[in-house]
Amino acid sequence: MSVKAPRGLTHARRLHGPDHHHLDGGSYSDVDLAWWADRAREWAADGRDVLCYVNNDGAGNAVRNARTLRDLLRG
């Protein structure tokens, strides 16, 4: 999948869970989160401000996913 943000604009991305059967459900795999970290780096390198926020579900997956994404971005 290719995700492009318009040049010069801040890009916000809401990660709301990978479960296609339940809105805002599930936990992202490390592979999925690494993909999003790569996209965020690309957008930042292109001069965009990037905001990613995670709000998967009530089971606490969002917190774990956000921490993993943060750690991936810190590299």
Image (cartoon, rainbow, N blue to C red):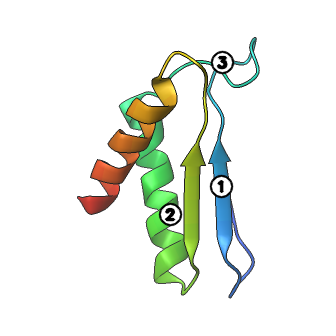
Q: Is residue 18 above or below residue 39?
A: above
Residue positioned 64% across, 19% down in the render: 25
Give the tally of numbered discs: 3
Left or right, 9 with reference to 46: right
Crowd tier of the residue under label 3, counting other residues whose Cα lies within 10 Å: few below 14, some 14–19, many 20 or above = few
Q: Secondary structure at mark 2?
A: helix
Contact flag, marks 2 and 1 (Cβ < 8 Å): yes
Crowd tier of the residue under label 2, counting other residues whose Cα lies within 10 Å: few below 14, some 14–19, many 20 or above = many
In front of the other: 56 or 42: 56
Residue positioned 52% across, 60% down in the render: 39
Of labels 3 and 1, earlier in sequence is 1
Residue positioned 54% across, 87% down in the render: 47
- From the top left corner, tell me how far across and down residue 51 is, in percent: 57, 63
Crowd tier of the residue under label 1, counting other residues whose Cα lies within 10 Å: few below 14, some 14–19, many 20 or above = few
Q: Which residue is mark 2?
A: 40
Quarter of image, res 74 = bottom left
Q: Is residue 16 visible?
A: yes
Of labels 2 and 1, earlier in sequence is 1
Left or right, 68 with reference to 11: left
- From the top left corner, tell me how far across and down residue 15 is, in percent: 62, 41
Q: Residue furthest left?
A: 75
Marks 3 and 1, Cα distance to the nearest angstrom?
17 Å
Q: Is residue 68 above or below residue 23?
A: below
Q: Secondary structure at mark 1?
A: strand
In front of the other: 8 or 16: 16
Q: Which residue is mark 1?
A: 13
Q: Is residue 1 visible?
A: no
Query: What amino acid is found at the position of numbered circle 2 in the picture?
Result: Ala
Residue positioned 39% across, 47% down in the render: 69
Marks 3 and 2, Cα distance to the nearest angstrom?
22 Å
Judge depth for marks 2 and 1 and give the one in front. 1
